[in-house]
Amino acid sequence: MRTTTAGPDVVVVGGGIVGMTAALTLQRRGARVAVLTAHDPADTVSTVAAAVWYPSHTDQDPRVLRWARETHTELGRQAADGVPGVIDRPTRMLLRRPYDGPPWWAEACGGVVAEPLPPPYTAVLRFTAPTVEMTPYLAWLRQRLEAGGGRVLRHPVRRLADAFDLAPTVVNATGLAARRLAADPAVHPARGHVVLVANPGLTVSVRDEDDPAGITYVHPRRHDVVLGGTYEPGVGHTRPDPDTAAAIRARCVALVPELAGAPVLGERIGLRPARHGGPRVEVDPDPGGPRGSRLVHAYGHGGAGVTLSWGCAPEVADLALDR
């Protein structure tokens, strides 16, 4: 497959949330776009995510704050427009440590209200956060891309340079695979384990990240509830662990007693594409392609891919289109 006058201007390698939002943003700016993905977007690690807006395990950074704010705004707009899978939900974050003011990300979600709580907690933070059911949402993104003339191709890439056979500009949104494809040792897996149960009528997301037994969160969706979870940096397997699943469920029932009788529907285990130093979004000075080629990296978002996606995508597009 070689670039022709009718071929794409930009190839995005990676069909997860970061790749698909970048591709759609590029298309909206007039570029002809193709997405190369080793797996159908519906089968990427993005579908395992609880997909709740929150900059989890993300360091304070002005650029990240901007991405989070712009994504919150865009997802809120999509929720109001009835985009499949997107809902604005009231969220409660329970704190066990002394409350010393709003967290660094508070302004990105329109503000946070703090209220005192009795022990073992110190305070509860109340805010609104979009939640995304990834299977219908990724399907919607793909439909929008294809309706605009874009293509999603099941085509594993062994080298990023091979993508220049299709287009002069390549966006590397390969997530965890960027460790190999971009020769970046900072990229590493962070194993995540969640349990899905039937929704007994919950509408509010609750999280207790200070739980000494492990990160705990309860995120309701239309027909189920995502119970979490784990964050295991450097762990690269997805084998089931019944003891971990039982511990997750026990913590979540203690946090939200209404879950006590909820039937278990299944489990999901995925590897977050984390990166020491935070996301890499930049032009590669040595793209490895023919003269005039351009390689833009967009990976390392960890467990905050959904949270940062729509804010990061315009920056990726600017770099890809040299604007």
Image (cartoon, grey):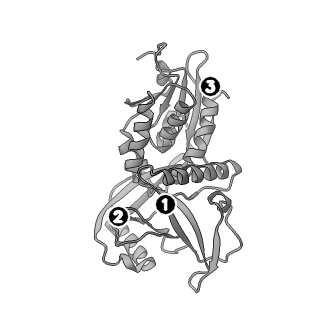
User: Which quarter of the rendered picture does the N terminus lie within?
Assistant: top left
Of the residues under marks 3 and 1, which one precedes in the sequence? Answer: 1
Amino acid type shown at disc 2:
Asp
Amino acid type shown at disc 3:
Asp
Q: Mark 1 touching mark 2, by CB under 8 A? A: no
Q: Which residue lies furthest to the front in this view?
A: 81
Q: Which residue is drawn at 43% across and 79% down?
A: 254
Secondary element at image label 2: strand
Q: Residue at x 45, y 34 (%)?
A: 145
Q: Is residue 174 in sight in this rendering?
A: no
- Give percent across and percent down for residue 287: 59, 25
Residue that numbered label 1 is attached to: 231
Secondary element at image label 1: loop
Residue that numbered label 2 is attached to: 224
Dot 1: few (<14), some (14–19), or many (≥20) neighbours within 10 Å? some
Residue that numbered label 3 is attached to: 286
- Give percent across and percent down for residue 248: 40, 70
Dot 2: few (<14), some (14–19), or many (≥20) neighbours within 10 Å? many
Of the residues under marks 1 and 2, which one precedes in the sequence? Answer: 2
Please determine whether, in this image, residue 171 is positioned above or below residue 53.
Answer: above
Q: Which residue is drawn at 49% across and 13% down?
A: 5
For residue 251, what is the image quadrant?
Answer: bottom left
Secondary element at image label 3: loop
Please determine whether, in this image, residue 143 is positioned above or below residue 125.
Answer: above
For residue 231, side relative to residue 105 (left or right): left
Dot 3: few (<14), some (14–19), or many (≥20) neighbours within 10 Å? few
Q: Is residue 25 in sight in this rendering?
A: yes
Q: Which of 199 and 97 is in front in this view?
A: 199
Please determine whether, in this image, residue 279 is positioned above or below residue 228.
Answer: above
